Amino acid sequence: MIVNSTEVQNNFRKYLELAAQQEIVITKNGQAVARLLGADKAVSFLSDRLAGIIPKDVDEGASKDERLLRQ
């Protein structure tokens, strides 16, 4: 479902309940700015998006160390 931000703001309770059942994309000036997901769907949404992006030969430990050095 795609809904503009004003509609969500004016009817937040309705969209909060709907988010438990389906993903809601919130737009502002015609551009997607946020997604409203049920708590049980959030983890699978993120892991599904990462699948296939990270190469299998990545050294996770080295990547973590590198990120920590940049902070």
Image (cartoon, rainbow, N blue to C red):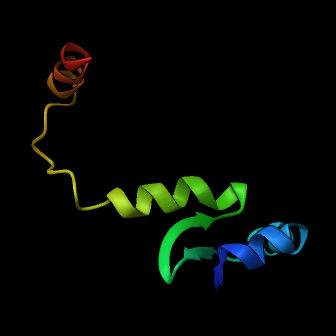
The answer to which image quadrant residue 26 occupies is bottom right
**Could you tell whether 41 is left or right of 51 in the image?**
right
Q: Position of residue 31 (x, y in %)?
A: 46, 78
Pick the quarter of the image with the C terminus.
top left
Rendered residue at 24%/23% (across/down):
64
Horizontal placement of 22 versus 11: left or right?
left
Outermost residue on the top side: it is: 69
Residue found farthest to the front: 29
Q: Is residue 59 above or below residue 11?
A: above
> Split into 4 quadrants, where in the image is the N terminus?
bottom right
Residue 48 visible to an observer of this rendering: yes
Give the mark count. 0
Picture residue at 55% right of the left edge, 74% below the top: 28
Name the foreground residue: 2 vs 63. Answer: 2
Would you identify the image quadrant in which residue 8 lies? bottom right
Above or below for 4 versus 12: below
Q: Position of residue 46 (x, y in %)?
A: 46, 56
| Image coords of residue 56 (percent x, y) | 15, 48
Q: Residue at x 65, y 65 (%)?
A: 36
Q: Is residue 71 left or right of residue 41?
A: left
- Which residue: 67% across, 73% down? 5
Residue 21 visible? The answer is no
Could you say where residue 15 lies in the image, as x and y percent from the top left?
80, 73
Q: Could you say which is closer to the camera, residue 29 or residue 2?
A: 29
Which sits in the foreground, 57 or 67? 67
